[in-house]
Amino acid sequence: MKVLKLIVKNVFRHKLRTTLTIIGLAIAVMAFGLMQTAVTSWNSSIRSSQVNRLITRNAVAIVSPLPYSYLDKIRQVPGVEEVTYMNWFGGTYIDQSHFFARLACDPNTLFNVYPEYQLSKKELEDFQNEGNACVVGSELANQYHFKIGDIITIDGDNYPGRWEFVVRGIYTPKFKSTDATQLFFQWNYLNEQVKQEFPERANQVGWFVERIANSADPGTVSRNIDALFANSPAETKTETERAFQQSFVSSSSAIINGMQYISFIIVGIIMLVLGNTMIMSARERTKEYAVLKALGFSAKHLIGLILGESLVISAIGGVIGILLTFSMVNGIGENIPRSFFPSFEVDPSNLILALVAVVIVGIVAAIFPIRRALTTRIADGFRFVG
Amino acid sequence: MQNLIEINSLTKSYRRDSIEVPVLNNINLQVPEGEFLALMGPSGSGKTTLLNIIAGIDKPTSGEITINSTDISKLSESALAKWRATNIGFIFQFYNLIPVLTAYENVELPLLLTHLSKEERKKHVESALTIVSLAHRMNFYPKQLSGGQEQRVAIARAIVTDPVLLIADEPTGDLDKNSAEEIMTLMQRLNSEFKKTIVMVTHDPHTAGKASALRHLEKGDLVSEPIASGKD
C-alpha cells in the first residue's frame, strides 16, 4: 500500500498514452459487453422456454399444417395435462417495417399452457366471448399506444383480406424474458373465415403446444404423441419447447456463435493494447527498476508496482467500458424491435464476465514487463539506455 | 580502526558466448570504518564491477567479501535486497531520481521498506534534506531542480536510512565544476561529521583528491598500495 502513490503516479506519467490506452480498453470492453448482451438476449428466448411444454408440428416442415382433429387424440396421451394450438397469421400492420407476431390461438387453453402471459379474468372473458377480439402484449401496447376497445387492422398475406381485431385485453409478462410483443386472436374467427374463402385450408392448425405433468418424461410423451400419427398423411414431430426454439433459431446460430467468438477475440485485442502499453512503460523504466532493486525493493515490490499499474489502467478502462455498455444497451434496447430481442439488457453474468476479463487482461498484460524487470540484472539496468 | 570492508581473493569474470572474460583478479582489499576511499582506473579496469560487488548488486565469481561482519557473497537475492536496504546508500552519476516523485518522495522511497510510521518517515526525510540544504525544495520535482540539487537529493536518499556504507559511482561526472565542488564538500562532510564510510569510483583526479584514501585498478588488478589522499 505504501507504493500505491507511485503506482498512481506511474499510471499517469504519460498522460496521452495512458488516456488512449484507457479509451481503447473502454471501447473494447463496451464492444465485448454489447456482443455478450446480444448473445445472452438471443439465447434468453431459449432459456425462458418451459421444460414442461412440448411442441407438436408437422414432421415435414413447420409451415405444413396439422389437422385440428389431432387435438382430442393428443389430449388422451398419458402425461399431457393441457393442449393448445396456434396458427401463424402473418399479415402487415401499417407496413412491413411494423413487424410483430400475430397468432391465431385457442382463447380457452392458451393461458393455461402459457401462465407467464398474465391477463385479468375480465379481459380473458371478453377475449373468449367476442369472435374478433384480440389480446396484445403490454410492450406492444406501449409501442403502438393500443388500448382496450381499439381496432387493429391487418392486411393478410397467408390469409388474404383485410382483418379487423378489437383489443379486449393486454397481457403482461410474468418474467423479464417473456415475450410481450405478440398479438393473439381467436383461431375460430380465422377458421370460420377460411371455411368460407379457402375451404381446403379449413380445420388446420400450425402446431400444438402441450403442457405435461411435472412427473412426465418429455421424451416418452413426445414419442407417444408421434406414435399416434405414424404412417398418417400428416406425421408429427414432437419435441420440448427448448429444442423447438433452438431449431427455430438454428439458422441464426452461426451468427450468434460468431459474435461469441468475436467477443473473446476482443478480449485478446484488449490484452494486446494494454500489454503494449505496459511493455513500453516497463522498458522505459528499466533503469528505475534497477534503482529500486538497488535500494532494496524486492521482487514482491516490483510485481506489486507493475501489476498494480496494469490493473489500475485495466480497471479504469473496464469501468468506463461497462458504463458505456449500459448506456449503449439502453439506447439500442429502446430502438431495436422488441420482437427481435424481447429482453435486450445487460445481464449480471455479462457484467461479471466483463469484470473477470478486465482483471485477466490486467494480469496477463503485466506478465512480460514483470518478467523483464525481475530478470534484468541491476548492473545491466543501470547501463540501459531507453 | 576496525575494517568495515574485507575482501579476500576476490575474482569476477563474465562469460561471453563460450569465452570467459576476467574482470577482477585476486582482489584483496580492506577498508576501515570511517574511511573515504576513492577507486580510480581507466575504463574497463573493473572499478565499477568492484563497486557493484561491494554494494551487493553483483556477485563475485570466487573469493570472500565481508561487509560489517556479513559475508554478502553467501546471501540469496532476497536477503541481499534486505541487506542493501539497511546497509548501503547509493549515489549515482546520473542521480537516478524517480521523475514523478517530489524530492521529499524520492528521499522517502528507501524508508517505505522500513516499519517507520508516516510521522517518523517525515522526520527522517526532513532531516536528510536539511543536511543536504534542500529542505526548502522538498516539494520540487527532479525536473525543477538543477543537476547539483538533484545530486544532493540523491545523497539525501542515500543517507536517509543511516546506512553504514555509502557507494558513489562518479558522483560528479555529470556536474559542472561548481556543483561538483559542492557535492564533494558535502560528501567530505558526511565522512568527517557523520562518520560515514564511503567508497567512490571516479575518473577525475581532483575529485579523487577529496577522498582520504586512493586505490588504482588496472586490468582487474589493484595495482597500488593505499595512498593517503590529501583532503582539500
Image (cartoon, rainbow, N blue to C red):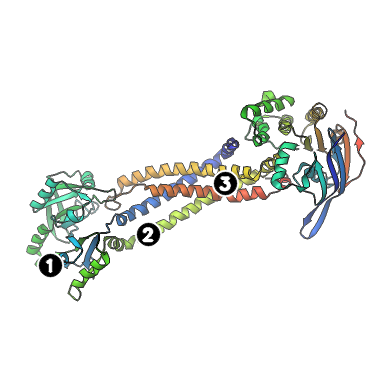
Q: Residues within 10 Å of mark 2 (few under 14, many from 20)?
A: few
Kindly identify which residue carries mark 1: A69
Q: Nearer the viewer, mark 1 or mark 3?
A: 1
Kindly identify which residue carries mark 3: A277
Mark 1 and mark 3: Cα distance apart in space: 70 Å
Residue at x 55% of width, y 49% of height: A365
Residue furthest to the front:
A215
Report the front residue among A61 and B189.
B189
Q: Residues within 10 Å of mark 3 (few under 14, many from 20)?
A: many
Residue at x 82% of width, y 47% of height: B64
Disc 3 secondary structure class: helix
Return the chain for callout 1: A
Mark 2 and mark 1: Cα distance apart in space: 39 Å
Residue furthest to the left:
A196
Location of the C terminus of chain A (image quadrant):
top right
Q: Are marks 3 and 2 in contact (CB under 8 Å)?
A: no
